[in-house]
Image (cartoon, rainbow, N blue to C red):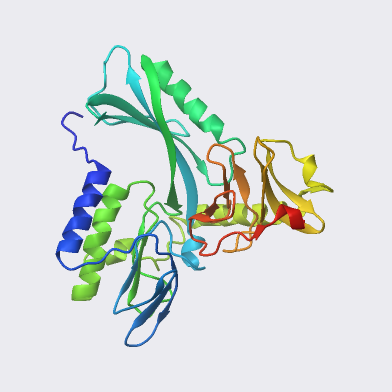
Amino acid sequence: MPDQAQFHPVKYIKALCEAFINTGGIILEDCLAEKHDEQDDVIILKTSKGEIKAQHLIYATHIPPGLSILHTTNAPYRSYAMAFSLKDENYPKDLGYDLIDPYHYYRVQEINGETLLIAGGEDHKTGHEEDTGKCFSRLENYVRKYFDVETAYYSWSSQYYEPTDGFPYIGKLPGSKGKVYTATGFRGNGMIFGTISSRIISDLIINGNSKYENIFNPSRIKPIAGFTSFVEENAVVAFHFIKDKLFKEKITSLHEINEGEAKVVKYEGDSYALYKEATGKVHLVKSTCPHAKCEVRWNSAELSWDCPCHGSRFNINGKILTGPSVMALQRVDPEDS
């Protein structure tokens, strides 16, 4: 399809931020929202930088923190992308997708005056791929099969949430008193659904209703459209919760782990996530995700510990990379173990 619209996401969000600030808005960066208390006349939000009071609260994030029904109706996925230059400079003029599972897509983007092909795909559930580096390899091989690649310049991955019935959840947060809102389950289509969310939620706050609220209602019940997927996803969560609790490699010494290796192990009666650098330096954290007590798994491509249940991610020292967990993995001094 010719003449498709193409947005630059960073420029788009930058302009939105500037418009927000120009109308009196304040943006606090590096500020973690930990929990909220929805009272009759005010909402008190506890953050890593103190308390914030407001009349309305919107969780415009991958998935709201805490535990709610939304964590059983959304599954976390990782998606991969790479940027290439082409020898023949025969760059496609369209945004294309294939119908393979896992799927692939491509588009072009001008970066610093140079045209590059951006290709993505190889999606999988977070924490369910043993060697995430292979995802990049498979993606690159796929691109080289169909394009005359000169150089692979960049590679990265991102996270999104897949709703069980295929539609995002936009509106009042289930269990709230009506003044806390959420926008989640975008399936990787944030440009579309993020913009729709702003319209729906602003209408709900200002007018008390939106003509789209029933379609995207976070409290909707669809026993047919999403029931099978709902059961399958939660059965997978339960399976991995039990499996990872029962089957851990037992070690008697931290020296049993090779340089460059990472494992979840049973050591002196406790469960640890252990990573040893090529230099021999050991990074040791408790392996249980604080969010819902699942066991984390190693992400070899990004050197992170990922939760296979609801998608929380942590760096090698336990610091939060992505929610829904609002607590870090407990760090342990190897010298004390």
- Residue 83 position within the rendered picture, expressed as x and y whole percent measured from the top left: 36, 28
Tell me the quarter of the image containing the N terminus.
top left
For residue 299, above or below residue 321 = above
Q: Is residue 19 left or right of residue 54?
A: left
For residue 126, above or below residue 269 = above
- Residue 314 position within the rendered picture, expressed as x and y whole percent measured from the top left: 55, 52
Q: Outermost residue, right direction?
A: 252
Residue toward you, 203 or 273: 273
Tell me the quarter of the image containing the C terminus.
bottom right
Residue 215 placement: quadrant: bottom left
Q: Is residue 42 visible?
A: yes
Residue drawn at (43%, 61%) of the image: 222
Residue drawn at (35%, 60%) of the image: 29
- Residue 74 position within the rendered picture, expressed as x and y whole percent measured from the top left: 47, 56
Q: Is residue 151 left or right of residue 242?
A: left
For residue 187, above or below residue 120 = below
Q: Is residue 172 left or right of residue 163?
A: left
Q: Is residue 97 visible?
A: no
